[in-house]
Amino acid sequence: MPPIFSIARNAFLEAIRQPIFIVLVLVGLLAMVCNVNLAAFTMGEDEKLLIDLCLSTLLIVGLLLAAFTASSVLSKEIENKTVLTVVSKPVTRAAVIVGKFLGVAGALGVGYYILTLACLLAVRHKPQMGMGRGEIYDGPVLTFSLLFGLLALLTAGLLNYLYRRPFPSTLTACLAGMLTIAVGICSILARDWWLQGPLTDYNPQLMYAIGMVFLAILVLSAAAIAASTRVNQVITLLICCGVFLFGLVSEFFLGRSLAEGASPLVRLLAPLYVAVPNLQVFWAADALSQGHAISPEYFASVAAYAAVLITALLSLAVLLFQRRDVG
């Protein structure tokens, strides 16, 4: 196996075995459940608000997962000097960075997949107060999500007790498998338990929006990898939060001003506007709520923008890591 894939595999296993990983996933699942109730208190816009809340949950929990996971697989190894055993072998430091990123991206993909399944179940259920009296609860969603969720928890507990399997990673795998079955069953059962086509509740626009949020999370994880080459985990978390917040508002405060002829002060901040990822590009909830379609071409352009950002951030990480003393 090439060294880069061995590093990626170890980073992936290390990431999903961290207790904070499954804790954040469980918090995200709980938030998805709460979103169904929170979205009910609107004036006829409950379903749009539910989608906004679910996408916001995916973005925020994904940010925390990216920051904690990416920083722990590199900065902790640098602090503990364990990365020295890797770089002392015939493995380039660039391969270490790319391998770590691939492992973190795989772990984030698994966690995000679980949260996406919960998001689809929540959107299928719909806000309670927005339904008629006889349609308050979606029987198949409640039945199979609870059934397979408890079955995943029980299976992970038994495997940990009987075979000493790591509980966080085992529960992660069980949730991914069980919730997939739950979503599959609910896709062929209507709210009244009658059979329906598996694509009846499928919304391609929502899937585009979910995919774009995941691209933003990958960009943030690359930023976390770059930061963790030089600073500890706490500072990395602060940097990720700063990139996240500035990336959301940079277009509003700087992009428009630069386009309309900015003041000298705004021109001084222009390099910062170019360097920091514009996360508004990845946020499609407003387009969905206003009825604007997300075309495949736009999704492809966003994916290309994400690829450029990830490549630039990983290149920066390689440059910062090249001269980092790890001995």
Image: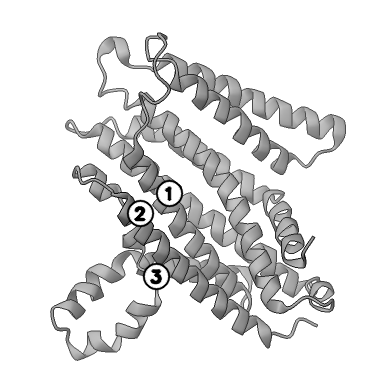
Image location (x, y in percent) of residue 172:
65, 40
The answer, for residue 27, to whether it is visible in the render is: no
Up/down of 107 relative to 35, above or below: below
The answer to whether 128 appears left or right of 24 in the picture is left
For the N terminus, the quadrant is: bottom right
**What residue appears at the point 51 percent right and 24 percent down from the top-left corner?**
184
**Residue under circle 3?**
277
Image location (x, y in percent) of residue 228:
61, 73
**Residue under circle 2?**
299
**Residue under circle 1?**
211
**What residue appears at the point 23 percent right and 84 percent down from the top-left corner?**
266
Mark 1 or mark 2: whose residue is earlier in sequence: 1
Residue 322, quarter of the rendered image: bottom right
Cβ atoms at labels 1 and 2 below 8 Å apart: yes
**What residue appears at the point 30 percent right and 67 percent down from the top-left corner?**
249
Q: Amino acid at mark 1?
A: Gly
Up/down of 54 relative to 221, above or below: above
In this rendering, which labeled residue sits more in front, label 1 or label 2?
A: 2
Q: Amino acid at mark 3?
A: Pro
Q: Amino acid at mark 2?
A: Phe
Image location (x, y in percent) of residue 190:
38, 15
Mark 3, Cα crowd under 10 Å, few <14 / some 14-19 / many 20+, is: many
In this rendering, which labeled residue sits more in front, label 3 or label 2?
A: 2
Looking at the picture, tell me which residue is in the foreground, 25 or 191. Answer: 191
In this rendering, which labeled residue sits more in front, label 3 or label 1?
A: 1
Mark 3 or mark 1: whose residue is earlier in sequence: 1
The answer to whether 219 appears left or right of 156 in the picture is left
Image location (x, y in percent) of residue 15:
68, 54
Cβ atoms at labels 3 and 1 below 8 Å apart: no
The answer, for residue 83, to whether it is visible in the render is: yes
Q: Secondary structure at mark 1?
A: helix
